Amino acid sequence: MKELRLIPLCRLLTLAAWLALCWAVAEGASAQTWPDRPLKFVVAAPAGSSIDVLARIIGDRLKDRLGQAIVVDNRPAAGGTAATDFVAKSPPDGYTMVMSFNGPLAFGPHLYSKLPYDPQKDLAPVIITSSQPNVLAVTAALPANSVKELVAYAKANPGKLNFASVGNGSSSHLTMELLKATAGIDIVHVPFNGSPPAVTATVQGETQML
């Protein structure tokens, strides 16, 4: 497993400040005092995932700026669509917000014939909090140290390898499907609810790559 590149903390805190500014603008545009009660971040990933950590960092800074607690509510089910649907059906009062990866918002409408929400009509974008690259990592037991070697091994063992993703329709799922189609290899998709179990499964050798 190769080390993943992390987003510097200073960038995260800068983004948190921008998010606070967006909320301050919304507050100034309204005639009432906001917020007058705790806010909720509904996270479309489990505790310990990168989105969860980011939500807690931003929430901690906003707590001091806004004078209200930020409640983090993890709802990783259904590849993030459960969290997104929950927020889409919540009162549009600025107190319930979803922190999600791009799957439920950008990919979902093109992958599923019907979603319980419309990302363009039921949700209002606030800010892009972070960006991070997708990486390809394999379990240490797999005899492959490059993409070329991995493709060759997969072709020699069709259908015998599998890969973990953070959920159906996620970028980690679709990029591997793209690799399969481009390289002409047969590997089995194993979806998980978020990155912590997907990484754990690959480290322990239950899945071969992610």
Image (spheres, rainbow, N blue to C red):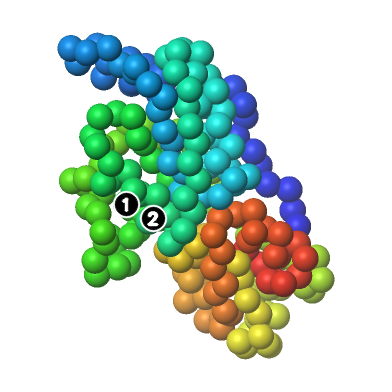
Q: Residue 31 placed where, x, y %?
A: 18, 12
Of residues 204 and 31, the one drawn nearer to the viewer in this rendering? 31
Q: Is residue 47 above or below residue 192?
A: above
Residue at point 56%, 50% (across, down):
46
Label 1 SS: helix
Q: Which amino acid does label 2 sit on?
A: Ala
Label 2 SS: helix
Residue at point 51%, 13% (across, down):
64
Question: Does residue 146 appear left or right of residue 38 in this picture?
Answer: right
Q: Is residue 89 above or below residue 143?
A: above
Q: Residues within 10 Å of mark 2 (few under 14, many from 20)?
A: some
- The residue at the far front in this view is 37
Could you give the CA–CA distance between mark 1 and mark 2, rounded to whole angstroms?
5 Å
Q: Return the residue at label 2.
A: 82
Q: Residue 161 placed where, x, y %?
A: 66, 80
Of residues 83 and 12, the one drawn nearer to the viewer in this rendering? 83
Q: Return the residue at label 1.
A: 85
Say if residue 170 shows up in the picture: no
Q: Residues within 10 Å of mark 1 (few under 14, many from 20)?
A: some
Residue at point 30%, 68% (across, down):
112
Q: Is residue 32 above or below residue 128?
A: above
Residue at point 48%, 71% (across, down):
177
